[in-house]
Amino acid sequence: MGESEASRVAIAQRLRESREYVGLSQDEVASALGLSRPAVTNIENGSRKVEATELHHLARLYRRTVDYLLTGMRTPAAEPAQLAFLARAVRGLSERDLGEVARFAEFLKHGKRSD
């Protein structure tokens, strides 16, 4: 297997795993991209190259970066450090309490405040 073919197979595997991770069927992906289900199958088994525009749409659909789908390398999260703190802060809260936190966040985002 040549380097190009090995790369295509690795991309295909990441695409399949990403699709399965978000819980989409090949039919759903095909519909979202305007492809046939066999085309998605061929992309996922490495027998069909994925086009750049398709890769971009797949990345958005799977909530992954194009870089990850191409290389498997995860880039450091661009989110602020406060997000990690907030995730730890709400861990263990009840569903009701999480709802209150979400409502408060919406209030802060959209409510009138005098800073």
Image: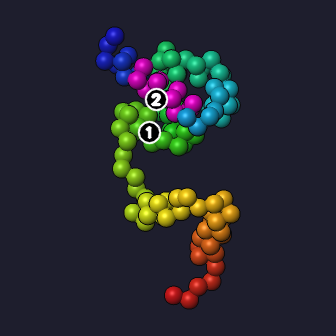
- Residue stretch in magenta: 9-20
In the rendered image, the vertical position of residue 95 relative to residue 10, given as above or below:
below
Q: Residue furthest bottom?
A: 114
At label 2, the amino acid type is Arg
In the rendered image, the vertical position of residue 63 relative to residue 86, given as above or below:
above
Dominant SS in magenta: helix
CA separation in Å, label 1 and label 2: 11 Å
Q: Earlier in the sequence, mark 1 or mark 2?
A: 2
The label shown at residue 14 is 2
Residue at (37%, 22%) from the top-left corner? 7
Percent coordinates x, y for residue 4 in the rendering: 34, 19
Q: Residue furthest top?
A: 1
Q: Quadrant of residue 84?
A: bottom left
Residue at (62%, 34%) from the top-left corner? 23
Residue at (43%, 26%) from the top-left corner? 11
Residue 45 appears left or right of 6: right
Choose between 50 and 112: the one closer to the eye: 112
Q: Disc 1, disc 2: CB below 8 Å? A: no
Residue at (31%, 18%) from the top-left corner? 3
At label 1, the amino acid type is Val
Task: Quickly name the residue at label 1.
Answer: 66
